[in-house]
Image (cartoon, rainbow, N blue to C red):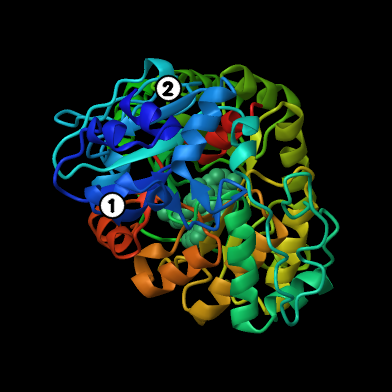
Amino acid sequence: MALLRFAEDPSPEHFAALPFGPGPVGLGLGASVHRFVPAGELADPSSWILDVEEFNGWAGPFDLLGFLADAEAAGHPVAVTAGPHDHCAAPPWTHRPRRRGSTRSASSRPGSTAAWSGSPSTSTWTTTAGSSWCASTSGRREAFATIRRPRPDPAPVHGLTGAGAGGDRWGMTAIRHDWSVEEAFALLSTPFHDLLHEAQRLHRERFDPHVVEGAILLSIKTGGCPEDCGYCPQSSSWSTGLTPQPLMATGEILAAAERARAAGATRFCMGAAWRGPTDGQLERVAEAIEAVSALGLETCVTLGMLDDAQARRLAEAGLDYYNHNLDTAPELYGEIITTRTYQDRLDTLARVRAAGISLCCGGIVGMGEPREGRAGLLAQLAALDPHPESVPVNLLVQVPGTPLEGTPPLDGIELVRTVAAARIMMPASMVRLSAGRADMSDELQALCFHAGANSIFLGDRLLTTDNAGDDRDRAMFARLDTTVADEPVRRAQELAAGA
Ligand code: SAM
Ligand code: DTB
Ligand code: SF4
């Protein structure tokens, strides 16, 4: 209330009532602090203006005091939180309580003084010395209308024709499903800095560039797979030394999901080395999905091919995402896999969509494909309507014993180009930098995040191979001023949009 009074009337008397400690105050939007200001300077209302270009699709600069007053006047809920927030002041990875369907999670943990409320008129506001605070939005889009500033016309970028053409009523770049392979190839071949500039510009239209979403994988049925995917250590066609494991019990899966949640993941992904599940196997997975969903985690499974009834059963269990990758361009598919066709993949994707489940669909780069192959894959992914909500870009993990062992490694810059092209062609999708991070430098990953990747797998393991690991990731994100999202990014966007 003291803050709201100051927002409405920034008098010295109202400023004196603000309980700042002696330390600097962090001003932020959403999950990022953008500036630290000595507390004394905040008596001047102009010092509350954040010179931030964009936030959640809105153009800045953002006047935080004006925002509070306007939102209150419009009767829209605003959450004001204070104290050393997990998401502002501390490194990521701490488990935060999350309420499914809530506008955003309260940012508190034992010992934190963060306070939360749904409306300024009932907000509690506590603070500690050296605190940071931020105003977080939880209302509908209209709540922000009063702080929106006209977006300047983007500077024309050499070599990019039409990528940013058109726009919706919020000034965001239009979503296209008609990318040709030639256009995708031209995009991948764009002068590097122009390509990255455009990818970052589009990324900022819809996403906070300092927030990355975290998922954790579990192999719930390992190895012994009848398919002959040339990249995969789990195929029974190759001798990779992997010991096959049967489908895990639900209790075991649930315990892993609880650990994933405690490690800061918002999505739990369960993978099974099947060509497709039997109905009995699917029933057991459905049971696991229900149990994992009840923890408040988003769920994703990847089980191979599905029929219509199986897709509907997964939807009924509350499955959020189905992972089914197209993996490479159609014309290269037969060189990598002979036991199923590209059309089999597309058919399962259509069944999953028809059942109302979101798609996680991407591919693998570094399998020896030429740039045309990556263009072909991207054009196929972008032709899916709607675009897959998650697009995993896997860098081949070369496993001894698989036919693709010994493939000349992909140039890292080409990986960055692929991520940037995925971001430009599918601007509203989460682009996940998936397999292969264990062998990437922080610098290469930083370029991928700059190119628009905004999701990763956390933890030490992927399905059967090593992942970068929490310690490395924590250090990397500290270097990059990046946090791991404490709630699913797309869900938060939908709620903010009043969907
Ligand atoms: N059997 C199911 C299927 O193929 O859809 C689900 C599991 S499969 C392991 C899931 C995905 O993991 C594959 O589509 C592929 O994109 C990815 N993958 C498998 N092995 C990989 C490797 N060595 N490097 C990178 N990605 C890999
Ligand atoms: C995806 O696109 N990548 C993940 C997930 N979906 C299932 C799998 C990566 C597997 C890497 C090799 C392994 O660990 O077995
Ligand atoms: Fe089996 Fe999936 Fe591996 Fe192919 S990628 S061998 S289908 S587990």
Q: Which of the two discs, 2 and 1, sits closer to the camera?
A: 1
Report how far apart the C-alphas of labels 2 and 1 lie in the structure.
23 Å
Q: Quadrant of residue 297?
A: top left
- Residue 113 relative to residue 47: left or right: left
Q: Residue at x 47, y 32 (%)?
A: 68
Identify the residue at the far front of this view: 12
Location of residue 446 with respect to 393 vertically, above or below = below
Residue drawn at (74%, 55%), measured in percent from left and top? 173
Q: Residues within 10 Å of mark 1 (few under 14, many from 20)?
A: few
Q: Which residue is mark 2?
A: 120
Task: Pick whichever, 487 or 143, lies toward us.
Answer: 143
Q: Quadrant of the C terminus?
A: top right
Q: Is residue 303 above or below residue 57?
A: above
* Residue 306 against residue 323 in the figure, above or below: above
Residue 98 place in picture, x, y as percent: 38, 25
Report the side of 168 relative to 125 (left or right): right
User: Residue 198, how many percent across, how many down?
Assistant: 65, 69
* Mark toward the start of the polypeptide (2 vs 1): 1
- In this picture, residue 435 sits left or right of residue 467: right
Residue 101 screen position, x and y as percent? 51, 21
Tell me if residue 87 can be seen.
yes
Q: Secondary structure at mark 2?
A: helix
**Camera-side residue of 444 and 101:** 101
Taking the spot 55% from the left edge, 33% from the top edge, the residue there is: 491
Residue 235 can be seen in this image: no
The quarter of the rendered structure image containing the N terminus is: top left
Residue type at numbered disc 1 = Glu
Q: Amino acid at mark 2?
A: Pro
Element under disc 1: helix
Q: State which quadrant residue 165 falls in.
A: bottom right
Q: Which residue is mark 1?
A: 41
